[in-house]
Amino acid sequence: MTRLGNDDLGTWLYAPIGAAASYAKSGLAVLPVNFLTLIPHEAKWWVSTWMWGNPTVDIELYVDIVHPPVWESESCLRVIDLDLDVIRHRDGTLEIDDEAEFESHSVAFGYPASVVAAARSTADEIFAAITANASPFGSEPRRWLAAVGN
């Protein structure tokens, strides 16, 4: 991803359709959409990605619930995905996804109770924030979308 810049919300990254991506579960892939990703400055339990450019992909906003991300260097970000996701579809519907997977992994990997509680409360908070069109899920991304020509 390309670092677009920083603001009071965090670090904004961009990757265009067709960029190479690497996933722990499935290996290398090509991005089917443009990605605009916000990594919050503060130690928050989420990373958000706005998606566009491919009408066959039904997701507009994808918020991964994660253990707080850590910048290990200027170009290396460590993110531990906790499976829960808050997804806003193109038609505006909103859902918390992968709850069964989160529950299964919580047990299988022995997540501490504090991690389970933080992940669940974060998912609920993000759901409410998106519903209310609250920052950063309101108009904040427009500046960065304009920077990449959308």
Image: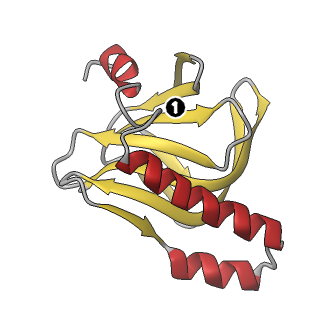
The residue that appears at 37% across and 44% down in the rendered structure is 132
Q: Nearer the viewer, residue 13 or 43?
A: 43
Front position in the image: 147 or 95: 95
Which residue corresponds to mark 1? 1
* Horizontal side, residue 143 vs residue 89: left or right: right
Residue 122 percent location from the top left of the image:
61, 56
Q: Quadrant of residue 33?
A: top left
**Mark 1, secondary structure of its residue:** loop
| Quarter of the picture holding the C terminus | top left
Residue 23 visible in the current orientation? no
Which amino acid is tagged 1? Met
Depicted 113 relative to depicted 1: above or below: below
The answer to which quarter of the image holds residue 57 is: bottom left
Can you say whether 110 is above or below 4 in the image? below
| Place of residue 5 in the rendered image (x, y in percent of width and height, measured from the top left) | 55, 16
Q: Residue at x 60, y 35 (%)?
A: 39
Q: Nearer the viewer, residue 80 or 106?
A: 106
Residue 37 in view here: yes
As drawn, 53 above or below 94: above
Q: How many marks?
A: 1
Applied colour scheme: secondary structure
Which residue is at 50% across, 51% downward?
126
Residue 124, image x, y percentages: 53, 61
Q: Residue at x 39, y 27 (%)?
A: 141
Q: Badge 1: how crowded within 10 Å, few (<14), some, or many (20+)?
A: some
- Residue 98 position within the rendered picture, expressed as x and y whole percent measured from the top left: 49, 73
